[in-house]
Image (cartoon, grey):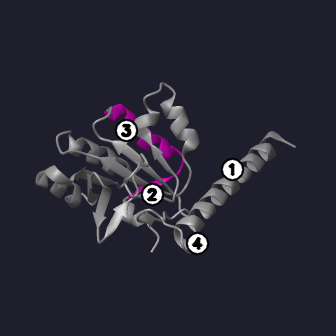
Amino acid sequence: MTKDERRLKNTLILDLCILAVIAAVSLAAFWLPGVDTGGPALRGNTDANGIGLQIAATGEEDTARYLDALDEIGAKATFFFPEETQPDDAMALVRSRGHGVGTRGENGMYIGGGASVPVMSYRSGSGIRQVAPSIDTTKMFVHSEGAQQFASSLHRGMFVYVDAADDFADFQKIVQIAVDKGYTMLKIDEMLMP
């Protein structure tokens, strides 16, 4: 077996394992009778090459800089602002540039229309669970090998969480890695299955 054949085989096995996990969690969350799901859970569009980009923002950081970086490569994201201090100017700027806006608080992230968004940290007691795979980059980029970990963990149909209060250079690395791997970064509502 050649090196390329082994790589293809390993990729196929990894994809099948990911699909099996998604199927098992989806079954438990949506179709088993009598199972208390503990709150809303949204199904991510795991068939697409899209990445649902969630950015935890406050309005105090340079939101325009994040928007410029995304616009430069044609990427979209959903910015989540604190529900208690919703900065109208920053939220209006994000909307005007074609990105999504949501709020975040003790009970998770909210994008409107009755849809709560899965929280990356899987906080206990939040009542919100995520079915699609996700990456919380705030934990990953604490380590020096964070960029390599992110690149190897990134797969199609995932949600990626970024904290705008973290290092902007790390944010640029995250976006560039996703683009280099051929993924499209989308607003959260574009990633949800109907």
The answer to the question of whether label 4 and label 2 lie on touching residues, with beta carbons closer than 8 A, is no
Task: Quickly name the residue at label 1.
Answer: 14
Give the dominant element type of the magenta stretch: helix, strand or loop.
helix
Q: Bounds of the magenta span?
A: 168-186
**Count of marks placed on residues:** 4
Kindly report which numbered mark, 4 or 3, lies closer to the viewer in this rendering. Answer: 4
- The amino acid on which the numbered mark 4 sits, given as a three-letter code, is Leu
- Kindly report the distance in space between the C-alpha atoms of the residues bearing marks 3 and 1: 27 Å
Within 10 Å of the Cα at label 1, are there few (<14), some (14-19), or many (20+) other Cα atoms?
Answer: few
Kindly report which numbered mark, 3 or 1, lies closer to the viewer in this rendering. Answer: 1
- Kindly report the distance in space between the C-alpha atoms of the residues bearing marks 4 and 2: 16 Å
Is residue 90 at all visible to an observer of this figure?
no
Between discs 4 and 3, the one toward the N terminus: 4
- Kindly report the distance in space between the C-alpha atoms of the residues bearing marks 2 and 3: 25 Å
Horizontal and vertical percent for residue 64?
A: 21, 45
Task: Quickly name the residue at label 3.
Answer: 171
Between discs 4 and 2, the one toward the N terminus: 4
Kindly report which numbered mark, 1 or 2, lies closer to the viewer in this rendering. Answer: 2
Kindly report which numbered mark, 2 or 3, lies closer to the viewer in this rendering. Answer: 2
* 83 displayed left or right of 139: left
Kindly report which numbered mark, 4 or 2, lies closer to the viewer in this rendering. Answer: 4
- Kindly report the distance in space between the C-alpha atoms of the residues bearing marks 1 and 2: 23 Å
Within 10 Å of the Cα at label 4, are there few (<14), some (14-19), or many (20+) other Cα atoms?
Answer: few
